[in-house]
Image (spheres, helix red, strand yellow):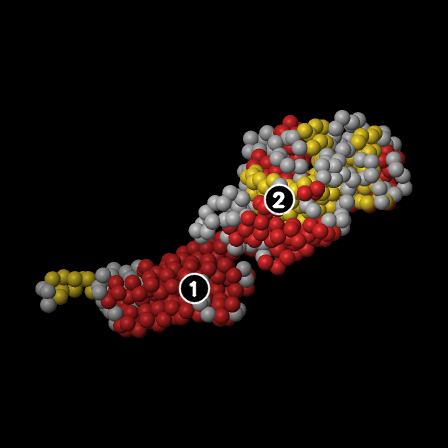
Amino acid sequence: MGRISIVAAIIMVLLMIGYITKLFPMRSYNLVYVFFPISIVALAGAAILSKTKFLYKSGFKYYAMATFILAFAILSVIVPKHAILTWAIPVAVANHYYRPKLSLVVFIICAVSLVACVYLGAFFGEYDPNLLSAGKVIYDEATQTYVIYQPDNPVERWNMLIEWSQKRGANRFLQIFLFYCLPRLLALTIVFLASYALSNRTQTLLVNEIKATESSRRIDTELNVAREIQYSALPKEFRSTQHVDILAELVTAKEVGGDLYDYVVIDDEHIGVLIGDVSGKGIPAAMFMMKTITSFRAYINTSDSPAEIMRNVNKILYNGNESKMFVTCFLAILNTRTGVVKFANAGHNPPIIGEEKNYKYLKCNSGFLLGAMEDSFAIDEVFTLKPGQTIFFYTDGITEARDVNSGFFGEKHLLETFNKVEGDSIIDLHHTILEELKKYMEGADQFDDMTYVMLRYKGDEIVDFERIFSTDSETSKEAISFVNESLSGNGYDSLKDKFSEVVDEVYSNISRYVYGGFDGKIYLRLSINKKKNELILTFIDGGEDFNILSDEVAKDGHKVEIIKTKSIMDEASYSRIHDKNIIYLRKEIDSLS
């Protein structure tokens, strides 16, 4: 309304200039000088008020509509033969407020004003032969020519109408209403009814849209709550114990999904790992997923047989399963002392097992999914993990991830991804898989949940300690304490001072030269390989491509030197893999005396 008022005020100014400069033929300009400024000020006032807080008060719409009616009334009086249809504007605009009473009142006011302004315009406005007469021919002494006499005086116009009525034998005032006002009133009524109907339809659509938006927001809120509840039931992303490292990832295709995973310490020598995929998506799948996890946790300690646990869970899922949902599952129980893995498969994807550049799919029975039939057909199977090997459990959302051409990521591509990774850290595997999937799916939508769990078996021969730190100075002290505590806990107290110097030197150089002093993340791993009698420190960062071991000249002009590190460690190497800098430092235990 504020913008419309500005445009209307500008048009009124242009009209006023046109009449004053005689661009428009009008004999009397008295009304132009008086009433045009009034309407211009009123319209400009509405535009000014629209920029203030008054715009948000209910009174603004009444003021705005009043200024329009006033402006068009003045215009209709001054130029009745040109401005008569402008009355349709406030009638149409009033419906914008979606107030039926307001629209009706404005229509009535405009209809009455139209009639009143027509009669006022006949006497005070520009001469309109349709209202008065074509005028009579008189002789103009000044120009000595015959001209049409069109009086500007209201009294003379009144007399002209009276004379016209007497000569024609008809009431000219009534004829003005019937032939001049009534057709325009009918046109105005049509405009009112059309805009009113359109307004009602628009209001209905807006109300429905508001309801739909509120419903969508409510659903989004419920989905977010459900997602939080779902994720809270899952274990943390990364876990490192004396014998195993476990890392999990779940990327849902919707706010909540049907993929599930779990890992739990059963006793001092056994760890259970579960992964599954519920049929369907959304809240129903998430609810079935929660039921599945809860059931497995209830039975995980009741037997050392994964197949028996599955049979008990299947009974719970099958009973009362009116929605006919089902879930594929793979349950493995690892003996952390021997590396023996007892597992059962219920229609799930076979996992990948192996170590650096030597991974393959585990051969196993496919089994039959849970929840669909009264009996479970899972059987127990066994294989043995060697120290240093990793087992990768996943859902089909990974192998069935699609690119922009709807091609599948595939089992072959997944295995190739594993066998090209340098290093055997599950952190490396984790980042490589995510980056490879992201690269493959770039520009395409995710159609299914993507979930995986990685377990790296260290046994008693390899002990790894891993953690991720930020690059601020306080956190560097935490990194040194982390390494010292790890060394002390394994009987290497005498090595803490030397390794503290190494960690401090490498950490500070990565922070300064790789991240340039900005916040970043550093993954630090200390590996104790008792079989090979060696200690290994690994630093991984996601900063710029820069080798702090090569004595390069940094951007600030300083030459990077890692003197203490090179003098203490037996081997120091650098590699750049998948946009990550990897520093590998090895020292033989026998030489650290």
Q: What element carries label 1?
A: helix
Instruction: Name the residue that disc number 2 marks.
Output: 569
Q: Which amino acid does label 2 sit on?
A: Met
Image quadrant of residue 435?
Answer: top right
The residue under the point 72% across, 39% down is 533
Disc on the earlier residue, 1 or 2: 1
| Residue in the foreground of this view, choosing between 171 and 140 | 140
The residue under the point 76% across, 33% down is 386
Report x, y in % for residue 526: 68, 45
In the picture, measured across the screen, residue 490 lies left or right of residue 45, that is: right
State whether residue 137 is above or below residue 514: below
Q: Which amino acid does label 1 sit on?
A: Gly
Q: Do the residues labelled 1 and 2 touch (CB within 8 Å)?
A: no
Mark nearer the viewer, 1 or 2: 2
Numbered mark located on residue 2 in the image: 1
Q: State how far apart marks 1 and 2 are (Cα).
A: 76 Å
State whether residue 73 is above or below residue 435: below
Q: Is residue 48 visible?
A: yes
The quadrant in which the N terminus is found is: bottom left
| Residue in the foreground of this view, choosing between 110 and 318 | 318
Report x, y in % for residue 582: 58, 42
Report x, y in % for residue 271: 81, 41
